[in-house]
Image (cartoon, rainbow, N blue to C red):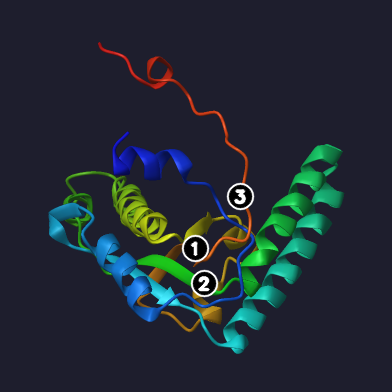
Amino acid sequence: MSLLDELLSKRRSIRKYKADIPPAEWIEKMIQCAAKAPSPSNSQPVRFIRIDSDKPRDSLSRAMADGHQKLLCAWEKSRSPKRLRNRINAYRRFSEFMFTAPVLFAVGTIVDFDGFSKKLFEAKLIEQDSRGDIDMDITTGLALKGFILKGEELGMGSCILTAPLVFIPNAEEILEIKEIRIKCFITTGFPDEIPPPIDKKKTAEIYRKI
């Protein structure tokens, strides 16, 4: 098995970390790998914002608690199935660890990116900029893959979180970030757990020829 195959096979989302803070140079190496990801027209729009101080972490934590309550209130008025309420509670519970993780990043893309689809839309050649957000999401995912795999190579774990942004729709405002649209959060550090193996789809299930 190659090193890449090994890293891909053993990678798991880590939610429990040791208290040790990873060396700054290791984090920078992970960021460097993220920066090498392909992007539309080599625009390199992805940004990593490390959230170190207590104030923004506490503000995000309070905002998530408020967002959680608002969703529960909306659920009560909607008469939706009970399982949806349970899911709201579960996603909040599974996200809270991020506020105590050794390293926490908000990851996003610049908001003023002029992509191909946007140019066509501005020229009124198409009815809407249908590709802009999709291209940015793909680019963010590619950057995160490099970040995660380099961390695995260094013996660090990580976990990507998007659910908190459902509870905290104004994360950019809380973090006082105007030029970046946050796509997700990601934690990293030295793992303090060994999650069990999980089943992945076979090649035949995701691949076909037409």
80 w.r.t. 69: above or below: above
* Closest to the observer, 98 or 193: 193
Report the amino acid beneath label 1. Answer: Ile
Q: Which mark is residue 169?
A: none
132 w.r.t. 32: above or below: above
x then y, percent, for residue 59: 64, 81
Residue 111 visible in image:
no
Q: Are marks 1 and 2 in contact (CB under 8 Å)?
A: yes
**Mark 1 or 3, nearer chain start:** 1
Q: Which mark is residue 104?
A: 2
In this rendering, position of residue 134 left or right of residue 166? left
In this rendering, position of residue 57 left or right of residue 180? right
Report the amino acid beneath label 3. Answer: Ile
Label 1 crowd bin: few (<14), some (14–19), many (20+), radius 10 Å: many
Q: Residue at x 22, y 44 (%)?
A: 126
Residue 78 visible in image:
yes
Helix, strand or loop status at disc 3: loop
Res 100 → quadrant: bottom right
Q: Which residue is disc 3 drawn over?
A: 194
Q: Which residue is disc 1 drawn over?
A: 186
Q: Residue furthest top?
A: 210
Report the amino acid beneath label 2. Answer: Leu
Label 3 crowd bin: few (<14), some (14–19), many (20+), radius 10 Å: few
Q: Quadrant of the N terminus?
A: top left
The span from disc 1 to disc 3 (Cα, nearest Å) is: 18 Å
Helix, strand or loop status at disc 1: strand
**Mark 3 or 2, nearer chain start:** 2
x then y, percent, for residue 73: 83, 58
In this rendering, position of residue 117 left or right of residue 174? left
